[in-house]
Image: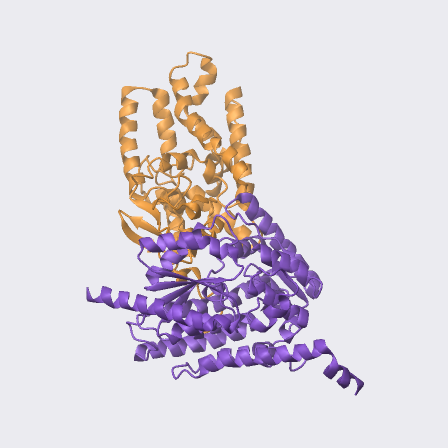
Amino acid sequence: MNISGLRWTISIISFVVLIFGGVTGLYLGRFIPAFSCGYVGSHLRSGMCVLPVFQSAVSYCSWESFKYLGEMFLYFSLLVILIGRAWCGWICPFGFLQDVLDLIRKKLNFGYLSFSEGVRAKLRCIKWIFLFVALLLPLWAAFPVLAPSVAAEFSCPFCQLCPGKYILPLVTADASRVAVNYRSETAFILTALGLLFSVLVIFGALMKRRFWCPYCPMGLLLSFYRKISFIKLKKDSGKCTMCEVCYNVCPLEIQQVFKERESEDVTFSDCTLCLKCVEHCPEDGALRATFLGKTLYSAKYEFSMPHSQRERTDE
Amino acid sequence: MNKEIIRKTDPIQRRKERLSRGLARSTQTALADLEESPDLPRSMGYFINIMRDVFADGRKDRLFRPTGFQSVNPKKVIGTYCIMVPEELIYAAGAIPVRLCGGSDETSGIGGELVPRDTCPVVKSSVGFTSLDLISLYGICDAVIVPTTCDAKRKMGEVLSSFTNVWMLEVPHVKETEGARKQWLLHITALKRDFEKLTGRKIRRKALQTAIRMIAGAQYEARRLHEIRKSKAPVILGREAMLALNAYGYDTAFEWTKAMARLNHELEQRRDKGRVVAGPNAPRVLISGCPPIFPNWKILSLIEEMGAVTVADESCMGSRYLYDPIGIAEKSMRHMMTGIASRYLMPCVCPSFAPNEDRLYRLLQMTDEFDISGIIYHVLKGCVTYDFELIRVEKIMKEKNIPVLRIETDYSPEDIEQLRTRIEAFVEMIGMKKSKMKRG
């Protein structure tokens, strides 16, 4: 099996386990560093995304809640240090859904959209805005000195915006989340925006590879660990021919990987470690994925040219 | 009858015949040199025949096609210069590419009358071939694509356009910028439309996919040869390997791949049996700089005459021709076109690009992988761009303690004795260095 096949298998398994695993009584905890959404029925899901835990702990702002948060954060950090953003590329159910939509596009042989460098640079602030929403707005809910009625809606603000909240329950045939909340103006705006994002992401993912991932605050949070994470993407500059193949196949359109000439570590913040670049890299050993310095998977000319890609000429 | 008399008395016609005979003679000399070797692999015969067909018997009749071409009946033939023209698109449109960069002394003299004196012999020879119509390779082209690489090639397009149907292909010279890459993709897409117009066949996804796969097959075999040439004791001479690669330009990818697979198979068997062309102590030379283009086998013959082996080259008519593959992850037209555009621009280390750091990295890597004892830096008179990069190549090689010999020459055989002396001294020097390093 090639690495893409392995990744698909693991994504399918983790999707089923995280979204439907609860049926078997499995419960993993409330610190999953992926969109294992808490809005999926609690009888179905087997774990929970760390973001709602975080936001509500901040919004309670009590000693108890912070102790709980600290505990969750510890587990979360350990998991992220272990495999870094491979959570995004290999495990995240929301990432998997985008991959499925992308597969539909591929099967229809439609091309994909790609943004120019300028547009990408401008859009880079979105994930920071989302992270700000997730980290700081709950503080307002904790200390509602201004406009307390507005602040009351900010106990879990990012979740209301997150497209995962609307799309993931839908996958479990639960359409109750796909609604606008009329409780208050703030709630209305948040949920309406959230629905808008969901529609955007569904259509976006049909047209662009991993449409949501560059804006995901969870991904940003995970990327903070990339220097100490055990899994790394490494490059041997001496072997790189700068052929740009890694950039062309990268779903996140990271171009620094082929441009980098100085540092060996090319795990950039957007990298979800899907290893497509390693798979398609035509230079033996130019790119590799390492775990604690040990090479897990290394680029090989033979991998980049599987038999389906070339005519058999052996006699 | 009347025609016959005119043909015999017309001075231009007479000159043409004289040159034609000269070309056939120098082709024979170069090929005889190869054929005399007792170690010549049997499968080399196919490639030698292609060269003979194209250059020595290339005037047999107007409708002549080189060996591999006989099996297919292409709608159109497209002549290409340099290595930036996507052959996948040509094949997908139902046409066939031939490589036109010239390497003959006879035609470079003639071409010299149409271009400035300081132009490089590649351009002179190409212009000579085209203007004289000496061999049918140049006459059968329905369109000739000239990428705007170096100054000489760029202006050559203008000169050629009075003899043949020239399409200029603009190549960006700074490839790192987003704008250049976007522009290049646009040019390639426009080229695709032009091919479709020329052949009257729309390039569909399936056809392009097949073409990519076919050339990937050729590239696979070229890489196999590349790997074989790394072996400790060489199993093939550089002048043979480079001839086989050079022949790709005058053959269809499909036929060439089959022949190359046979050669690789034979070489692998020889390697396993320990039948080598030189011992592990023979100096290993990397030929860098300007491409040796058949029939200009002067330098290549001299190096191996002196007992060294050209184990590697970075020539755009040799190893680099088919080295970099297209990397695609899906089969949408857009993705395939992006992949094609990348393959023909980004990994190319032609010195017409600036900055061209990649080439230094590539050379360093080659010296390690091929265990190079010395570099012969081939500069064809007038090739400024390769000469410019010599200083930096010398600098990095000095750090690695690998001697570099700059040889400036053209296609004429006049300086051969002088070159022989210099190459002999160089080979002796690197040979001594190698054995000294072995001992201690």
| Residue at image location 35% in from the left, 42% down from the top | A22
Q: Quadrant of the C terminus of chain B?
A: bottom left
Residue A4 in view in this figure:
no
Q: Position of residue B327 (x, y in %)?
A: 48, 57
Count of marks overlaid on the render: 0
The answer to whether A212 appears left or right of B141 in the picture is: left
Depth order, front residue of B293/B62? B293
Depth order, front residue of B308/B50? B308
Tell me where residue B263 sits by quadrant: bottom left
The answer to whether A252 appears left or right of B65 in the picture is: left
Depth order, front residue of B382/B208? B382
Question: Hue of chain B?
Answer: purple
Depth order, front residue of B161/A149? B161
Image position of B58 with respect to A144: above or below: below
Q: How is the image coloured?
A: by chain
Q: Quadrant of the N terminus of chain B?
A: bottom right
Residue placed farthest to the right in the image?
B2
Q: Position of residue A203 (x, y in %)?
A: 56, 42
Residue B32 in view in this figure:
yes
Tell me where residue B40 sits by quadrant: bottom left
Q: Which chain is orange?
A: A
Residue placed farthest to the top in the image?
A145
Q: Position of residue B429 (x, y in %)?
A: 31, 66
Q: Position of residue A9 (x, y in %)?
A: 39, 53
| Residue at image location 48% in from the left, 34% down from the top | A124
The answer to whether B69 appears left or right of B218 in the picture is: right
Residue placed farthest to the left in the image?
B440
